[in-house]
Image (cartoon, coloured by chain):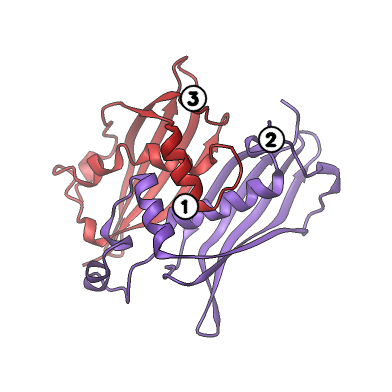
Amino acid sequence: MPQLTVRFEDLAVGDDVFSVSRVVTRDDVKRYADASGDQNPLHQDEDFARAVGFPGIIAHGMFTMGHLARSLTDWLGDPSRLKRLTVQFRAPVFMGETIVAEGRVKALDPATRTAVLDVWVRVERDGTTEYPIRRGEAEVGFADP
Amino acid sequence: MNAALEGKVYPDTTFTVDEERVDLFRAAVGEAGEIVPPTFATAAEFAVFPLIVGDAELGLDFTRVVHAEQEYEWRRPFRMGEALTVRSRIAAIRQKAGNGFLAIHTELVDGDGELVVLARATMIERAS
């Protein structure tokens, strides 16, 4: 069984708790399309992507959310502690780019041993920081079931 | 997009947490552990989404659709091999500044009738 690797008592509001980067490749996006069933050509077909106004294919929003969730559950050690995750998709991710998933403690409730985190995914592009995922929020339960 | 379809419930679909598919999903998102990733719920949603996007009554132009928001509430982890019932409905349809907003709510329910995951997806049909 996966074991919790974070202690509620060690967390403080404002703490930066994880930062995980990965390179987005065409192979992984294709794999994601097959695994998730999201076969929208915007994520596989260059001609289609250009026809609808993008410079090239983009990763699924859910591919990026998958990286964020994986970063969260790796940090926690026990994925069953992730109770809720909500995100807004606000910028595309192109092939070859490096996305960085990050989280910060927003609120702690000692009575229920629940932590709420601000979470996001950023990418550096042409000297500016873009946010493929902005204003995400995660709720983590530390009370033993 | 036909706003009259707000509230439409789509037929239940069965989705199996298939080991081979979970392996592929893990490889795609970079999960090294043995767990079923919580966002594997997306694969269950996509057992129904093509029916909604392709629903002639709804009249969505999929070439203009982008995913705007996603929320999951997990009540318990997935169990490898289990069969879940996927129940989707159109929770809301809104128009704003020429863009159409479509909210799809999906429940994943196990064989005991217990809710496993609640998923809320918001799609935008961009102004043409």
Q: Residues within 10 Å of mark 3 (few under 14, many from 20)?
A: some
Chain to which the residue tagged by mark 2 belongs: A
In the rendering, at what x and y percent does residue A36 appear?
Answer: 38, 45
Q: Are marks 1 and 3 on the same chain?
A: yes
Q: Which mark is residue B19?
A: none
Closer to the camera, A34 or A61? A34
Q: Which residue lies furthest to the top in this view?
A: B112
Q: Which residue lies furthest to the right in this view?
A: A9
Q: How crowded is mark 1: few (under 14 residues within 10 Å), some or many (20 or more)?
A: many
The amino acid marked with disc number 2 is Pro
Closer to the camera, B39 or B128? B39
The amino acid marked with disc number 3 is Leu
Q: Residue B115 carries which label?
A: 3
Which chain's colour is red?
B
Numbered-mark total: 3
Earlier along the polypeptide chain: callout 1 or callout 3? 1
The amino acid marked with disc number 1 is Ala
Residue at mark 1 to residue at mark 3: CA–CA distance:
26 Å
Q: Which residue is drawn at 66% across and 48% down?
A: A74
> Element at badge 1?
helix
Q: Is residue A60 visible?
A: no
Q: Which mark is residue B28?
A: 1
Q: In which quarter of the image is residue B83?
A: top left
In the rendering, at what x and y percent does residue A19 appear?
Answer: 67, 62
Screen quadrant of the C terminus of chain A: top right
Residue at mark 1 to residue at mark 2: CA–CA distance:
21 Å
Query: Disc 2 marks which residue?
Result: A2
- Please identify which colour was used for chain A in the image: purple
In the rendering, at what x and y percent does residue B72 appear?
Answer: 51, 41
